[in-house]
Amino acid sequence: MINQNNLNVLKLASKQDFKPEIASVLFTPEFTVATDSFHLIEMSMPKIEEDNLPGDAMEKFDPFMVRANDLKNLKIPKDKKNPICENAWVKEKEEDIVSIKDFIGCTETIHKYKMTPGEFPDYKQIIPEEGTIKARGAFNVELLIEGLEILKAMKLKFGRVEIKFYGDQKPMVITADNGEQKARYLIMPLTN
């Protein structure tokens, strides 16, 4: 099953056409993944009880890629009356075409996409292993975005900030310098 969070990853796919693999979203039974080689996001597929899966949904399939630009027409709105309708699913794969089906309102729609040939970068090799973490903390995403927006407004060279962790459950400090001004943004970790 695929929900809107899985589709939001396409925002990070490369906008350049010279490397179609990174201008695409990788779909696996477990994740959607997108990168532009500077940043990457991996989003797990939503947990759906087996009894609630549509009969024509493919639970297992070989990973495939679709160009992010092609996926922009696939929208999955919120449906408070029937949450299962907040998902789309892989219906079938044939040669170089994948069919993704959604159920919006009372209308079933099948979207057909040409799969991107080639191999998605082996991104798992660059993700640090869990045991190698030196410090960690949980932070409020709204506060983090708010602070980053302020730093972004400084017109930083290459949009560069530096992130410093001082230990478990310690504040994270993000510093920025545009040549005329310096800023330090400190955010406290959440407790529990």
Image: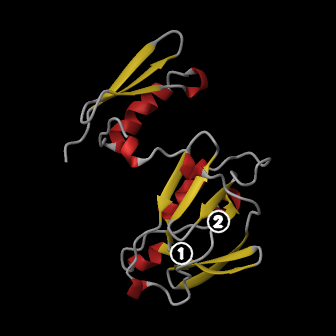
Element type at mark 1: strand
On screen, residue 38 above or below 117: above
Seen at 38% across and 35% down, the residue is 146
Compare residues 140 and 64 and report the one nearer the observer. 64
Q: Amino acid at mark 2?
A: Asn
Q: Residue furthest front?
A: 131
Q: What percent of the width, then of the height, locates residue 115? A: 73, 68
Is residue 128 rendered to the left or right of residue 171? right
Q: Residues within 10 Å of mark 1 (few under 14, many from 20)?
A: many
Left/right of residue 87 with respect to residue 82 in the rendered view: right
Above or below residue 9? Residue 84 is below
Residue under label 1, please give it. Answer: 88
Tell me where residue 70 appears, x and y as whole percent. Answer: 70, 62
Residue 86 lies, in percent from the top left, at 45, 73
Q: Amino acid at mark 1?
A: Ala
Label 2 neighbour load within 10 Å: few <14, some 14-19, many 20+ = few
Q: Secondary structure at mark 2?
A: loop
**Residue at the outermost left position:** 192
- Give the mark, 2 or 1, whose residue is nearer the N terminus: 2
Determine the residue positioned at 39% across, 48% down: 130
Q: What's the CA distance linking mark 2 and mark 1?
A: 13 Å
| Residue appearing at x 69%, y 63% in the figure | 66
Report the residue marked by disc 2.
73
> Which quadrant holds residue 114?
bottom right
Name the foreground residue: 60 vs 53.
60
Quarter of image, res 168: top left
